[in-house]
Amino acid sequence: MWRDEFKPLPVELWLSELGNFLVFCADAETADDDRAVRRAFHLAKIAPLAVRRMICPAFSESDLEDFLERQGSLEAALRLVQSHAQIEVAIRRGDSGDVAAIRYDDEQPSEFAAPSPTRALLGAWAEFLTTAR
């Protein structure tokens, strides 16, 4: 049973929020990787129920804060993205920043470029979620 504090958003609104999140991740002026991880965590928690079952983190918000403090934003982002699925993650330096690629199972990879590895990873995750398959 889903807890009341995490009511799902309607699909259209959630997809719109993912689009806003992609813009946030790509923004070179935004230097707050921890904030990106927190936003991704909350987007996963309020995902529509059909999607939530695949992406909702199996850990609490206090666990997330502990990951951020002890392990840093990239490790926290990896833990979030890999919470329920076996994925392949690759992060490389590109011409316009860092580029992350995520592949779930045999799907085509989703790639995203951002000013930091953390936001590239989270952007690739959000890109995957917004791409029709």
Image (cartoon, helix red, strand yellow):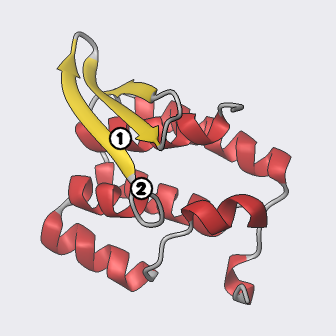
Is residue 42 rendered to the left or right of residue 25?
Answer: right
Q: Residue furthest front?
A: 106
Between 133 and 130, the one nearer to me in the picture:
133
Badge 1 marks a residue whose secondary structure is helix
Measured from the top left, where is residue 7 in percent x and y?
76, 75
Between 6 and 32, the one nearer to me in the picture:
6
Measured from the top left, where is residue 14 in percent x and y?
74, 51
Badge 2 marks a residue whose secondary structure is helix
Between 25 and 99, the one nearer to me in the picture:
99
Is residue 120 rendered to the left or right of residue 14?
Answer: left
In which quadrant of the rendered view does residue 120 lie? top left
Q: Which residue, given by chain and number where applicable, does mark 2 sit on?
A: 81
**In percent of the image, x 48 and y 65: which residue is there?**
84
**In percent of the image, x 65 and y 36: which residue is there?**
130
Q: Which residue, given by chain and number where applicable, does mark 1 sit on?
A: 121
From this view, report whether residue 62 is shown above or below residue 97: below
Mark 2 crowdedness (10 Å alpha carbons): few <14, some 14-19, many ≥20: many
